[in-house]
Image: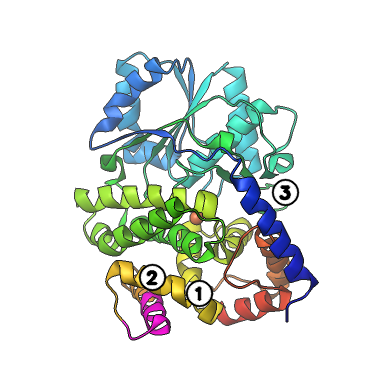
Amino acid sequence: MYGFYDLVCDITQCGIKVFDYFLGYRLPEYICGRGFISRLPQMLKDKGAGRVLVVTEKALIELGTAKKMLDPMDEAGIDYVLFTDVEQNPTSDNVEAGFKVFRENKCESVVALGGGAPMDCAKAICAKSAHPRMTTRQLHGILRVHKRVPLLFAVPTTSGTGSETTLASVITDSKTRRKASINDPVLIPKYAVLDPELTLTMPPGLTATTGMDALCHAVEAYTNHFYNTPVENIMAVRAVRLIYDNLYRAYKDGSDIDARENMQIAALYAGRAFTRGCVGYVHAIGHTLGGLYGVPHGKAMAILLPHVMRAFGPKAHRRLSELADACGITGRNDAEKAEKFISWIEDMKRLTGIPEKLDMIKDEDIEQIITWAMREANPLYPTPVLWKRSDFRRFIDSVRE
Ligand SMILES: [Fe+2]
């Protein structure tokens, strides 16, 4: 039954939709192509990057992926400092440590190399540099940065997060374990290098879960649709089609450079789509699992996505059937096409070894999960159906093993 809570959410979303038109959504300036990482040093020089803080993960140093970026930087004499203490779900402690390195070394710009973790950590370091006295927790929310930040260059090595194109930096509070987002258009990276060769070392499992994250961005942004302009709708549909055609190919054969390149473009489109269109309950619940149990973001997304879409019922059928159309999935009506599209996501999960349900949720954490998920999603996310506490409880019960 429509009540006061529904009314408050509707009014807030109408306000955000109007406000959205005055926000500075933009894409980073891109260079995009095979082997283009070798062009980064010149880019850094041309843009006056000065001394650079490189934020990345230890795993990328060990895999040799970072070397592909750092060697040309060394050869070109770029002055940089390396920071690699970034956890899989980056924490406020990681941000504080990174900011300390940035400040003590008098860095002037930041290069983020990796997936969502280094990129989000790098964005939060930039936010901190604009507000050194504020804690990461105080920066959580919308438009709290609102100041000039250091030049930020993004170099993605996974094809999922889309963080190279978004205004969000998701950070886990080290004390409470709550994952929350710093959202501000100033955090959209200024420049990005998309080189599919950097994604070739991604193992199959990570290829699958990060690809499912990109799918989730596109599907949630498209089914939300209230804030979307035609740009977000087109971006979301193209991303879904590219993922439909290429995710399994990239998973089966990691050296398939065409599939890798298409997945990288899909992640970019999906990231742009949800920057305005927003994500939904898959992300709101998934973020709590990352914070509380350290579940990798993409894995949480992949597990939850088909369950949430199915739980929305008829309210999501038309938009899901349009995504099915884009993929060439046929059916007699919207409901059938929507169900076939959800079944395809479930098939992808099975084929790539992603579990069907969640096995980590403890009874004593359920109320906390609901509180955090509701705080993130309502009233901001324009989901097809507004869930209240009881809806979240019913849903979580249905997806636990
Ligand atoms: Fe995501």
Identify the residue at horizontal 38%, vertical 70% (top origin): 322
Q: Is residue 44 visible?
A: yes
Q: Nearer the viewer, residue 107 or 219?
A: 219
- Amino acid type of the residue that numbered disc 2 sits on in the rendered structure: Glu
Count the labels in the image.
Answer: 3
Label ID, residue 369 = none
The percent position of residue 168, horizontal first and vertical second, equals 56, 44
Contact (CB < 8 A) between labels 1 and 2? no
Q: Quadrant of the N terminus?
A: bottom right
Label 3, on which residue?
Answer: 175
Judge from the rendering whether residue 325 lies leftward or rightward of residue 173; answer left or right: left
Q: Secondary structure at mark 1?
A: helix
Magenta part of the chain: 331-343
- Amino acid type of the residue that numbered disc 1 sits on in the rendered structure: Ala
Identify the residue at horizontal 32%, vertical 83% (top origin): 331
Label 2, on which residue?
Answer: 322
The quarter of the displayed image where residue 114 is located: top left
